[in-house]
Amino acid sequence: MRRSVCVLALAALLGGGCTGKGAPLDRIVATPTKIPGVAVVYAALGASETAGVGTFDPLRNAWPRVLWRGTLPSGSTLFDLGVPGTLASQALVDQVPQAVELQPDLATVWLNVNDLIRGVPAAAYGRTLGRIVHALRGDGRTTVLVANTPHVELLPAYFACRSINGLYTAPRGNVVQCPPELLGALPAPARVERMVDAYNEVISRVVRTEGALLVDLHGLGPVPTDHPEYIADDGFHPSNEGAAEVATLFGEAWTQSRPG
């Protein structure tokens, strides 16, 4: 399953793509914890990372669930709306209306990697993201946390498809294999890096304009080399450890947004 999702994501670089829609509303209520504060309603919007692809147990280890379980006050409710393969334009239609109807206190948005690998221009992506964040913010009662784009040009799955034989030994020793049809066909790292920078520029602009808060995943730096344990065996998605680190960054942004 992990490899098939990765293949679909990489195939999108060649003009294919993976889509996701019609997600069921996944609602879970926090069990009592020692975390003080008033319980909140939390809606998580996103794609495969938000759904927990790459973790051993997505129902427990997907980063929104780690955030909900470890940072939000006791009694808080999570609605996980993430669907693998979702583009920002699809989330605007499929996920945003559900989230708005919930009137959440907190909404998180990690929607950029699928758009980038599908070649959606940064300007067009930015317009869609702006509509998503604007709708979620509503009258300003909802805190919206938006992730920027990590260093996808450094992912082991990408290097596997840029290699001569389609194999790449990741820093932690696992071998990642590229589908034969993608071997040598992906853009050069410099081009991908420019695309990432363009996306992150428009994400920062949307966050400032709409009064949201930025979660700087790009600021983690070259994760595959500095923290290889953050990358799943598929060479593409966050592992359990990676999902926990993402949850920590979102949790820090949420905590900083709280009064007092």
Image: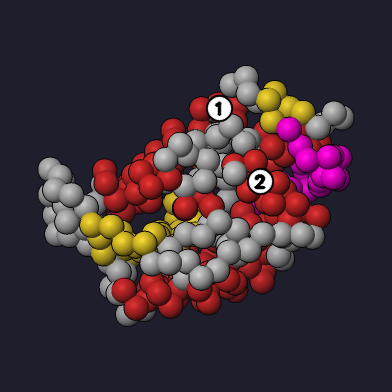
Q: Which mark is residue 228?
A: 1
Q: Could you tell me which quadrant the N terminus lies in?
A: top right
Image point (81%, 36%), residue name: 162
| Crowd band around label 2 with a 10 angstrom C-alpha radius: few (<14), some (14–19), many (20+) | few
192 is higher (above) or lower (below) than 176: below
In the image as oriented, which residue stretches furthest toward the front? Answer: 1
Residue type highlighted by circle 2: Ser
Magenta stretch: includes residue 197: yes
Residue type highlighted by circle 1: Pro
- Using the numbered discs, state the Cα–Cα distance from disc 2 to disc 1 in whole angstroms: 21 Å
Residue 258 placed where, x, y %? 23, 57
Residue 78 placed where, x, y %? 30, 59
137 is higher (above) or lower (below) than 8: below
First of labels 2, 1 by sequence position: 2
Residue 18 placed where, x, y %? 67, 59
Where does the magenta region start and end? 177-198
- Report if residue 144 is visible in the image: no
The residue under label 2 is: 4
Image point (71%, 65%), residue name: 120
- Report if residue 128 is visible in the image: yes
